[in-house]
């Protein structure tokens, strides 16, 4: 039996999940599917401009694995742009990075997904509503204490 694919750490979910070229009837429109971890590889390498080694560490995978994911992502996007195909961002095997926050009042600790932090920092403890909260120190590379929400086989687990 095949070993389940190792989950890749993803820090952000995209705002848009579907791109479609203008003027092509749906009946003849072709599309490519790009996974969330493929998109994350593009974000880290091509948008953030990180070195491959840093990208691999952020996604918690080996450098060769990162390279393979990045190449696959670039090839799909190039195919879509050159040949006028729709792009669907869907699925993958990944964990969503999250960051641990701690309440200075009652010591309550809770995780906040990275995507939520990007939109809005938490302001108060969900338990006692104290505003005396702090993110716990980051172990490395700006990501929280591991990843949390798991997406595998087409759904959140
Ligand atoms: Zn509290």
Image (tube, helix red, strand yellow):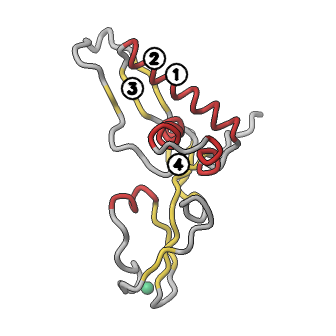
- The alpha-carbon separation of the residues under discs 1 and 3 comes to 12 Å
Q: Secondary structure at mark 4?
A: strand
- The alpha-carbon separation of the residues under discs 2 and 4 comes to 24 Å
Tell me the residue that label 2 is attached to: 79
Q: Secondary structure at mark 3?
A: strand
Which one is nearer the viewer's eye here, 57 or 156?
57
Indicate which label's residue lies in the foreground, 4 or 1.
1
Q: Residue furthest top?
A: 28
How many labels sit on residues?
Answer: 4
- The alpha-carbon separation of the residues under discs 2 and 1 comes to 6 Å
Which one is nearer the viewer's eye here, 112 or 134?
134
| Residue at 56% over, 73% down | 137
- The alpha-carbon separation of the residues under discs 4 and 1 comes to 20 Å
Tell me the residue that label 3 is attached to: 87
The vertical placement of 72 against 150, above or below, is above
Mark number, residue 75: 1
| Residue at 61% over, 62% down | 140
Judge the density around disc 3: few (<14), some (14-19), many (≥20) Cα neighbours within 10 Å.
Answer: many
CB contact under 8 Å: marks 2 and 1: yes
Q: Earlier in the sequence, mark 4 or mark 1?
A: 4
């Amino acid at each position: 039996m095949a070993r389940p694919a190792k989950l890749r750490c993803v820090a952000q979910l995209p705002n848009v999940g579907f791109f479609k070229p203008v003027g092509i009837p749906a009946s003849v429109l072709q599309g490519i599917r790009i996974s969330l971890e493929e998109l994350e590889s593009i974000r880290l390498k091509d948008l953030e401009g990180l070195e491959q080694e840093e990208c691999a560490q952020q996604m918690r995978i080996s450098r060769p694995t990162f390279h393979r994911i990045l190449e696959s992502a670039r090839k799909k996007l190039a195919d879509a742009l050159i040949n006028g195909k729709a792009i669907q961002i869907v699925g993958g095997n990944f964990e969503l990075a999250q960051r641990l926050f701690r309440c200075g009042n009652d010591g309550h600790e809770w995780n906040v997904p990275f995507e939520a932090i990007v939109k809005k920092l938490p302001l108060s403890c969900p338990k006692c509503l104290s505003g005396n909260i702090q993110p716990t120190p980051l172990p490395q590379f700006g990501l929280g204490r591991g990843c949390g929400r798991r997406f595998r086989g087409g759904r959140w687990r």
